[in-house]
Amino acid sequence: MNFFGNNKQEETAEQESAADKGFFTRLKDGLAKTREGFVDKLGSLFRGYSKIDDELFTELEELMVQADVGIKTTMDMVEELRTRAREEEIEDPEELFTEFQEKLVQILKSDFEPLELSADLNIIIMVGVNGVGKTTTMAKIAERYRAQDKKVMFAAGDTFRAGAIEQIEVWGQRLGVEVISQQAGSDAAAVAYDAVQAAKARNADLLIVDTAGRLHTQKNLMKELQKVKRVIAQEAPTAHKEVLLVLDATTGQNAISQAELFDEAVDVDGIALTKLDGTAKGGIVVAIKNELGLPIKLIGVGEEAEDLQDFDPDQFVEALFSE
């Protein structure tokens, strides 16, 4: 019997467990405002009733809408709970609360697609309006894969906003990531072209392409974004490509309309939801998943690199409803 081997395995298991606990603690801490502003109220609601009746469902609807779950998702969930209570003859409100949590996991798990790199070149096109944390999210993604010994490169494709190129270059220097850039005002698609050629020549594992923050009213920038995506598709046909939309959780239902517009323009592949630690209305996660059908790949629950986490539906609900 190899005692040394067993001890090493046990030590490794303990380290992995500690790491998992660290991530879960960060997640739980990051969701504190939502837990206090939404989940605690939900618990009080279900525990405050001795029977299931229309008044309970009416109050539940109000709480969910206030937490940015969204009208459509709220109505769908409440109607399903009504049906379950009736068909399964559920009489205990706390049992119905358990059903509610299970329904949340079911919604969040549908089409669950975490952010993963393929063995070949990977290209992530970062899109989103100004102020959502797009550049910071880029840096955190780069830091994650640099820690895994992956070769990461940046394309400073936001040639529109003053200072955007310099900001990417500062992050590149800080992280040890090569930045491909041109002068401010240059064609963003030309930057993307140069970056793809450089990434292929240097055998990069991951190229992260920044783009100008834009609104749907800025049609010229939306067309530019489409051109960037088209050039990347032409120049790297075999690369694993993703359009990652960064949304700010604190903007509530505005995030839904932003996602719809970007998806219409460039077919968004996934969402990075930032600043969840800054809102008491974390129900937006459920609304995004249920109403848009787009996978949430990453969530931001704090300022540190480790606070940008893979979205795990089970852990998210567990952190949300933990005491």
Image: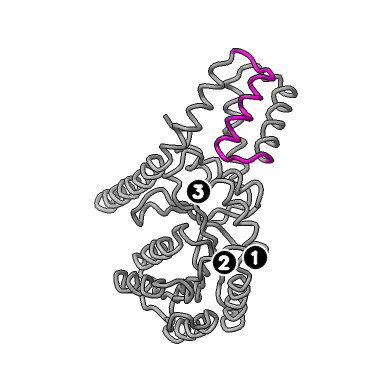
In the image, residue 76 above or below residue 148: above
Residue 250 visible in the picture: yes
Magenta stretch contains residue 70:
yes
Three-letter residue code for mark 2: Val
Mark 1 burial class by Cα count in 10 Å: few <14, some 14-19, many 20+? some
Picture coordinates of residue 282, whole percent (x, y): 51, 41
In this rendered view, identify the residue nearer to me: 21 or 289. 289
Which residue: 45% across, 46% down? 276
In the picture as drawn, the residue positioned furthest to the left comes out as: 4
Residue 118 visible in the picture: no
Q: Are marks 2 and 1 in contact (CB under 8 Å)?
A: yes
> In whole angstroms, how far apart are the C-alphas of marks 2 and 1?
7 Å
> In whole angstroms, how far apart are the C-alphas of marks 3 and 2?
19 Å
Disc sitting over residue 249 in the figure: 3
Residue wearing tag 2: 243
In this rendered view, identify the residue nearer to me: 162 or 190. 162
Three-letter residue code for mark 3: Ala
Disc sitting over residue 66 in the figure: none
Mark 2 burial class by Cα count in 10 Å: few <14, some 14-19, many 20+? many
Picture coordinates of residue 63, whole percent (x, y): 57, 30
Three-letter residue code for mark 1: Asp
Which range is magenta? 50-72
Magenta stretch, overall SS: helix
